[in-house]
Image: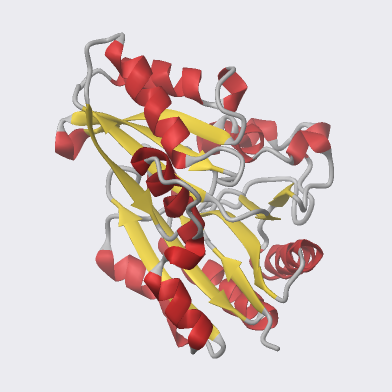
Amino acid sequence: MKRIMECVPNFSEGRDPDRIERIEKPLRDADDVLVLDSAPDEDHNRLVVTMIGKPEALKSAMLKAMEAAIAEINMEEHSGGHPRMGAVDVVPFTPVRNVEMEECVQAANELASRAAEKLDLPIYLYEEAATSSERENLAHIRKGEYEGFEEKIKKPEWEPDYGPQRLHETAGATVIGARMPLVAFNVNLDTKEVEIAKEIARKVRHSGGGLRFCKAIGLSLEDKDMVQVSMNMTDYTQTSLYQSFEMIKFEAERYGVEIAGSELIGLLPAQALFDVADYYLGLDDFSPGQIMENRLLEEL
């Protein structure tokens, strides 16, 4: 039986097509690795790549891609709307088929060890791979971002799990981990007031007293003349997309602001959309077996 793992690296480059192509090349050229999606974002200045493959092949390809990204990205010159602390900002592994979470944790540690030694890069482990409860939350690790990490990393409690206790001179630091499938879901608001988006994000995210498996920040989308509540839904089985959408809609009404649209970054499990359809259509006794494509796949 095939063993399939997912890896969704986030690189701090979303504007230069040539750089993006060079960063992605080791992933696209690798045997036993399939790139399913590439999502560069100019406002965030961030590239999210979704790929699946055999565990060892993913680790090898990812190490080459990290080397390429470090050669292409200078964090001293980087700016963008999304929080970041390094050229290769975050690399999560996720189980897909015939792979347990423990194997994803092992993959995270092995890649971190290889990358730290080969690239002289400080690396932190997060989520299921975290070495302490204080390091489970990516946002907590990344707090202060690249600009604030030069001093942060010197503190004893922020010694990296792998690599030197100093930032790479151009690539910053990297976070690698293992987690459940994450859904990157953004909701755009028809206003230019970024403080409104930030306030709504604070209400929606779990750390602000909002939805349990929701992380959210407010951003300005300058090319669209509007703002965005950008979210990571860390467990769609516990907190659905429609719950975050409706909560944002409710909070936006307080400011007389309407939702201008929403977007998905990268891929998501089909069940996440089935839950949305089930809720808004009010379907009785709905099951994924009623989806034609699902039945066809069962027969093939």
Q: Position of residue 240 (x, y in %)?
A: 50, 40
| Quarter of the rendering containing residue 95 | bottom right
Q: Position of residue 169 (x, y in %)?
A: 56, 51
Residue sitting at 48 percent across and 19 percent down?
Answer: 202
Residue sitting at 58 percent across and 44 percent down?
Answer: 234
For the question of whether residue 151 can be seen, the reply is yes
Q: Position of residue 103 (x, y in %)?
A: 78, 68
Q: Is residue 195 left or right of residue 84?
A: left
Q: Position of residue 230 (x, y in %)?
A: 40, 36
Q: Is residue 126 left or right of residue 12?
A: right
**Residue sitting nearer the eye, 163 or 46:** 46
Q: Is residue 247 left or right of residue 123?
A: left
Residue sitting at 55 percent across and 75 percent down?
Answer: 52
Residue sitting at 52 percent across and 81 percent down?
Answer: 298
Above or below, comparing residue 172 to residue 199 in the picture: below
Outermost residue toward the front in this view: 284
For the question of whether residue 27 can be seen, the reply is no
Total numbered labels placed on residues in the image: 0
Quadrant containing the N terminus is bottom right
Its colouring scheme is secondary structure
**Residue sitting nearer the eye, 7 or 213:** 213
Q: Is residue 147 left or right of residue 238?
A: left
**Residue sitting nearer the eye, 184 or 74:** 184
Above or below, comparing residue 131 to residue 63 in the picture: above
